[in-house]
């Protein structure tokens, strides 16, 4: 596991960071997002989708568990697993089948940690009390696949 830290001073910086990361990822890559409500997970996802010209289509997957975004080259699956009762519910919707067919962004992914493959990126968002615009993104890479990506 490798760790990195990125300090974002605005929503635009968070989105730019996400867009840059999106340009380095491929089908089969997984990003787990964690952080309190309002910490920047949705802005990150919006920036990520912007890289693929899909940012106008973003919506929260809170009530659907997963939203699918597709362009001619790639599928992006945006999960919100917060409302799942247990990991069995994730397996019941065929959640792990998405891992090999596109890029997966999984909010609250720590709740399904045992279903995740060996290689994934985890980004934890922390708000700074003294400045409402600043976010600290703590990035951890699991497995060796992402050793040279960040």
Image (spheres, rainbow, N blue to C red):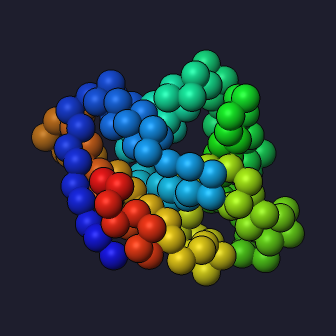
Q: Quadrant of the C terminus?
A: bottom left
Residue furthest out toward the right? 92
Is 110 situated above or below 29?
A: below
Q: Quadrant of residue 130?
A: top left
Is 38 situated above or below 114?
A: above
At 73% from the left edge and 54% from the top edge, which residue is drawn? 101
Q: Is residue 21 left or right of residue 58?
A: left
Task: Find residue 27 and report its horizontal and vertical position in percent.
Answer: 63, 51
Residue furthest out toward the bottom? 114
At 61% from the left edge and 25% from the top edge, which residue is drawn? 54
Q: Is residue 42 left or right of residue 13?
A: right
In this rendered view, identify the residue nearer to me: 148 or 52: 148
At 17% from the left edge and 35% from the top edge, which residue is drawn? 131
Residue furthest out toward the top? 56
In this rendered view, identify the residue nearer to me: 145 or 15: 145
Residue 20 visible in the displayed image: yes
Is 5 situated above or below 84?
A: above
């Amino acid at each position: 596991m490798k760790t990195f830290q990125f300090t974002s001073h605005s929503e635009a910086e968070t989105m730019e960071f996400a867009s840059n990361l999106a340009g380095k990822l491929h089908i089969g890559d997984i990003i787990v997002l964690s952080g309190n409500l309002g910490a920047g997970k949705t802005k990150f996802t919006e920036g990520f989708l912007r890289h693929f010209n899909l940012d106008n289509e973003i919506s929260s997957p809170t009530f659907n568990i997963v939203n699918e975004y597709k362009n001619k080259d790639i599928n992006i699956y945006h999960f919100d697993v917060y409302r799942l009762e247990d990991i069995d519910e994730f397996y019941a919707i065929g959640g792990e089948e998405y891992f090999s067919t596109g890029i997966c962004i999984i909010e609250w992914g720590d709740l399904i940690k045992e279903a995740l493959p060996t290689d994934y990126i985890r980004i934890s968002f922390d708000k700074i009390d003294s400045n409402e615009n600043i976010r600290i993104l703590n990035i951890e890479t699991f497995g060796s696949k992402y050793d040279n990506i960040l």
